């Protein structure tokens, strides 16, 4: 098997590789060409639920599997992470979705592999505040609903990683308006200078501004004179009636950059089903992760030319996230997705899903498919 997706892209095309076969074998076969190439990994592994789905993998010990035995599940995961380590760049980030049952055990295992201080935990609150009964808001339980999952974040070297700020829309507030009928929609104003008493004549950006009405205002501004003039040309300065201190217009529908939070909110679990059904018309036996959740992680940690990996690819949520993110941002991220076609997930969902997207995004993005036992 030759995994050409690990080579640098050529001709302006981002290739997305789908590998059918056991993921441990696939990781081992990639050791040569793909060594030190992946800088972003996301996996949604089979949780330790006590079901028999893990027996589709080639690990012989599943014959004696019991849900009460953490060791077998951890051994299953450890062998794959051990094969993953040589494939990672020095600044790689690995995201692993998991629930409460194996969270502490998996963290300890990852600390063993990545180092004591190179793991962190995010919480995905998967029932939005405005959720419906179908999203679990009315679900009966003897104690409390489980409205969250975890995403463990593991780093080859945490000190070498700096996450990007993420784009988010402002919350709807009653004081958003549009008094000047700006075509960009409702906005709220924010200050652009310090008060007269707090302005430092010897400080940065201290100068006199002349308003359109001819009024002179001397302050320490938050922007240089050139930056403020550019904002004014873009219609982002609100001068009011000429007697106010000018303010900056911030639009409701314009994303702003914020520092990522360890708690991910307002992305529903049910979105994952809708994402898949929209492209395939079918409902899967499992619960795929929402594309928006994975695009958020890409926005945080991926580079425009990243090589990303999912070796528990399932129905292909990460593949869709990468393809859409590339189209939205102009990035050329390449992906490698590994599936053992468990419950026909590759034939029924992953390939049909990504082939439809390929037709939308050609020629910039293309699929290539390998089956391990054929190469």
Image (tube, rainbow, N blue to C red):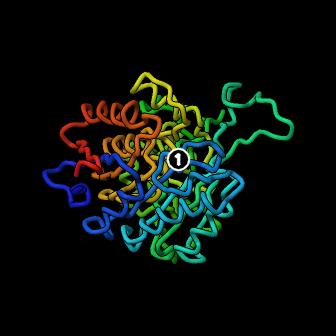
Q: Residue 351 at what x, y percent from top left? A: 33, 35
Label 1 neighbour load within 10 Å: few <14, some 14-19, many 20+: some
Q: Is residue 65 visible?
A: yes
The residue drawn where x is 45% and y is 58% is 209
| Residue nearer the viewer, 83 or 299 | 83
In the figure, 34 relative to 211: above or below? below
Q: Residue 2 at what x, y percent from top left? A: 22, 57
Q: Among all residues in the image, which is located at the extreme top?
A: 281
Q: Residue 373 at what x, y percent from top left? A: 28, 49
Count the numbered circles shown: 1
* Picture quadrant where residue 146 is located: top right
In the figure, 79 relative to 328: above or below? below
The residue drawn where x is 62% and y is 44% is 265
The residue drawn where x is 36% and y is 67% is 87
Q: Residue 106 at what x, y percent from top left? A: 62, 63
| Residue nearer the viewer, 334 or 79 | 79
Helix, strand or loop at label 1? It is: helix
Q: Among all residues in the image, which is located at the extreme left?
A: 11
Q: Is residue 195 visible?
A: no
The residue drawn where x is 52% and y is 38% is 288
Relative placement, left or right, of 82 versus 336 is right
Q: Which residue is mark 1?
A: 55
| Residue nearer the viewer, 163 or 285 | 285
Report the quarter where the N terminus lies: bottom left
């Amino acid at each position: 098997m030759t995994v050409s997706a690990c080579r640098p892209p050529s001709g302006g095309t981002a290739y997305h590789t789908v590998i059918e076969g056991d993921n441990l074998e696939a990781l081992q076969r990639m050791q040569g060409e793909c060594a030190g190439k992946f800088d972003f990994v996301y996996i949604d592994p089979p949780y330790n639920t006590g079901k028999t789905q893990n027996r589709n993998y080639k690990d012989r010990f599943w014959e004696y599997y019991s849900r009460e035995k953490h060791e077998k599940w951890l051994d299953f995961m450890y062998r794959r992470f051990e094969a993953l380590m040589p494939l990672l760049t020095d600044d790689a980030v690995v995201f692993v979705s998991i629930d409460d049952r194996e969270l502490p055990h998996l963290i300890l295992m990852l600390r063993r592999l990545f180092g004591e201080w190179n793991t962190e935990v995010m919480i995905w609150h998967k029932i939005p505040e405005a959720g419906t009964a179908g999203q679990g808001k009315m679900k009966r339980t003897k104690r409390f609903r489980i409205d969250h999952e975890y995403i463990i974040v593991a780093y080859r070297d945490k000190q070498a990683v700096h996450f990007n700020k993420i784009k988010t829309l402002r919350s709807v507030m009653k004081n958003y308006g549009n008094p000047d009928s700006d075509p960009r929609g409702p906005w709220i104003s924010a200050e652009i200078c310090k008060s007269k008493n707090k302005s430092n004549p010897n400080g940065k950006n201290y100068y006199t501004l002349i308003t359109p009405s001819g009024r002179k205002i001397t302050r320490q501004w938050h922007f240089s004179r050139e930056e403020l003039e550019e904002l004014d040309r873009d219609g982002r300065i609100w001068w009011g009636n000429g007697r106010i201190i000018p303010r900056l217009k911030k639009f409701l529908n314009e994303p702003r950059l914020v520092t990522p939070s360890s708690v991910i909110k307002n992305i529903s679990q049910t979105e994952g089903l809708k994402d898949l059904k929209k492209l395939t018309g079918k409902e899967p036996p499992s619960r795929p992760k929402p594309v928006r959740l994975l695009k958020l992680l890409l926005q945080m940690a991926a580079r425009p030319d990243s090589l990303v990996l999912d070796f528990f690819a399932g129905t292909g949520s990460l593949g869709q996230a990468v393809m859409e993110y590339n189209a939205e941002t102009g990035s050329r991220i390449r992906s490698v997705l590994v599936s053992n076609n468990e419950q026909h997930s590759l034939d029924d969902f992953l390939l049909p899903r990504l082939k439809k997207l390929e037709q939308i995004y050609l020629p910039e993005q293309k699929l290539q498919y390998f089956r391990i036992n054929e190469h």
